[in-house]
Amino acid sequence: MSGTMDGRQASGQRRADVYLPTSVKEVRDRGWEYVDVILFSGDAYVDHPSFGAAVIGRVLESAGYRVAIVPQPNWRDDLRDFKKLGRPRLFFGISAGAMDSMVNHYTAARRRRSDDAYTPGGRHGMRPDYPTIVYSEILRRLYPDVPIVAGGIEASLRRNSHYDYWQDRLRPSILIDAPVDIITYGMGEKSTIEIAARLASGEPVTSLTDVAQTALLTSTEEAPTSSDDENIVLNSFESCLRNKALQADNFRHIEQQSNRIHGATLWQQHGEKMVKINPMWPPMSTEEMDRWYALPYTRLPHPRYRGKVIPAYEMIRHSITMHRGCFGGCAFCTISAHQGKHIASRSEQSIVEEAKAITRMPDFKGYISDLGGPSANMYRMGGRDRGMCAKCVRPSCLHPRVCPNLNSDHRALLDVYQAVDALPEVKKSFVGSGVRYDLAMHQTGDGRVDRTNGRYVRELIEHHVSGRLKVAPEHTSDEVLKLMRKPSFELFHRFNAVFEKINREAGLRQQLIPYFISSHPGCREVDMAELAVETKQLNFHLEQVQDFTPTPMTLATEIYYSGIHPYTGEKVFTARSDADKQAQRKYFFWWDSSQRHEIVASLRRMHRADLIERLYPSRRFGDPKTRRKK
């Protein structure tokens, strides 16, 4: 979402009155006697379309509402940040920020992080754990009669009962713990606008029970007693506490409905209350997407942060999001739970206009850092027969095989690249988002499409790689990859060969940067040992690696918690202890001499001398007795 820049930004000035007001002075400077909506955000206020609070604020502003924002309020003092703007005419809006607060605060080993990319200076400690709960409790005490609307990743992904990895327990819907009136889940523009309009018309917040893509508490008497085509009654929170298999069963329904074009309403009982989750909106039209991205964002941090670096902003300041949604359906990813699997794309003209706005930024040096999206190369893609898509409940259009109804033509993406690169101020545009190489290399059987997609791969590698191209094979074991809903590693071998060939032909020296995950459900220590051997043969010293972190509303998290696969009911092994996780993680660093002794000892314990020989050939690092004989 981007807007045009007027002369004030082009000249490098940052007048506060072109931002959403953040203080009493800024509100008064606008001549306002009241504010319609006050937004509280766990992130710093960056007026850029990659920051959710800025998006919602600008969308409400475009509808004629007076909006103010309080970024990173202090919840530990006399609460002056929560009091300074008084009560809004319509509602308080709350977002924990662009990340779930617990992912933001803690590593996969549950250790506290020392920094926060969404805070000036990267300073940690500027938001509490679970800000949605903390902020709403404070506002409810101070203003008991003012409606509170929660949104953002944290509220969105915790709308049902969910496993919380950091507390190692099943938690109820966040609606039980946070005294909010309603949650807008997913991308919240349309739901928030409807809520504001209905409150402005005089409706009480208690009547807003039918807004699409919202979740709320209601009474058990209002819920259906059984499931039908329009309603799905989930297992109650209490029953899920008693039986983990019931939580897994719930997830299957939740995932399927969040990926449908026209989903059912979900109901889950929590004690004497019923959580009602209304279906998602159908995918946004191109016209709607263009409208949100054409709002007058300054694309800059608020002047209050002058002189301070906000790391997350530095990463995206010259980037462009071309589409939303992802039909990959990866087992460990939350994108489809939040944005859905159906792609909503902007027009080429909208993207080019944003590129022009970036070229007018004072610090622009000619390089667009990213033309991308959740997955970089799904722009304008979807089912040929939308009627088939409307009936589909498959969580992935790519796994276990590419859907024959999927139009994977990359022509529109090539056209966008060409149009942006044609701008005289643009020296080069890069693709910084992750690329689905399985999608780009899929052979459709349509000669025209396959040739176009081949051209896309060459165009991408020759002209849109900033020295390093990020891809995500995630593992090398086919069995683990099946659980991840990822393609066979053999396809990565093929893409790597193509990457190297095109680099040779073009005289380029670029790197392929693969992402891998350890301790994912289904992964055993021997699988990681074989991953080490595979990546050594490819001459990779891995950089982008991580332990699996269970986050709410993913298939992998439900397997981790319940021990069974929600779709098959089969038991699945998962490394859970710190020792088991470290036993897997060490294989990422087979090349580090400090890890060698432990790796060799582990492989001997598993009776895998063959892997020792392949990792550490005896002529160099084998058994000491062997070396003495030589």
Image (cartoon, helix red, strand yellow):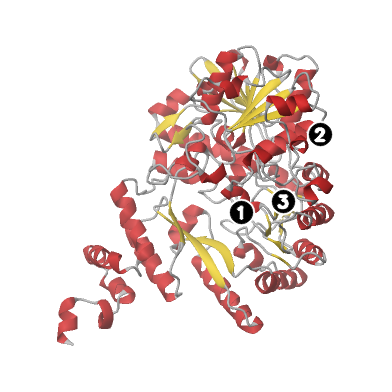
Residue 383 versus residue 201 in the image, above or below: below
Q: Is residue 576 left or right of residue 225?
A: left
Q: In front: mark 1 or mark 2?
A: 1
Residue drawn at (51%, 14%), measured in percent from left and top? Answer: 272
Q: Are marks 2 and 3 in contact (CB under 8 Å)?
A: no
Mark 1–mark 3 distance (CA, rounded to whole Å):
18 Å
Q: In the rendered structure, are the residues bearing label 1 and label 3 in contact, judged by CB atoms less than 8 Å apart? A: no
Q: Secondary structure at mark 1?
A: helix
Whether 20 is drawn above or below 347: the answer is above
Instruction: Identify the residue under disc 3.
Output: 323
Identified at 59% across, 24% down, the residue is 81
| Between marks 2 and 3 in the image, the one whose residue lies nearer the viewer | 2
Viewer-closest of 612 and 451: 612
Residue 274 screen position, x and y as percent? 56, 20
- The residue nearer to you, when weighing 205 against 79, is 79
Q: Determine whether, in the image, residue 334 is placed left or right of residue 595.
A: right
Q: Which mark is residue 315?
A: 1
- Counting from the top left corner in percent of width and height, residue 114 is at 43, 45
Q: Decide which of tag 1 and tag 2 comes sooner along the chain.
A: 2
The disc labelled 3 sits on which kind of residue? Answer: His
Q: Callout 1, which amino acid?
A: Met
Location of residue 88 with respect to 578 vertically, above or below: above
Decide: is 149 above or below 519: above
Label 2 crowd (10 A; few <14 / some 14-19 / many >=20): some
Rounded to the nearest angstrom, the CA distance separating label 1 from label 2 is 27 Å
Q: Secondary structure at mark 3?
A: strand
* Residue 51 in which image quadrant: top right
Q: Which residue is mark 2?
A: 62
Q: Residues within 10 Å of mark 3 (few under 14, many from 20)?
A: many
Q: Position of residue 266 (x, y in %)?
A: 60, 29
Q: Is residue 90 visible?
A: yes
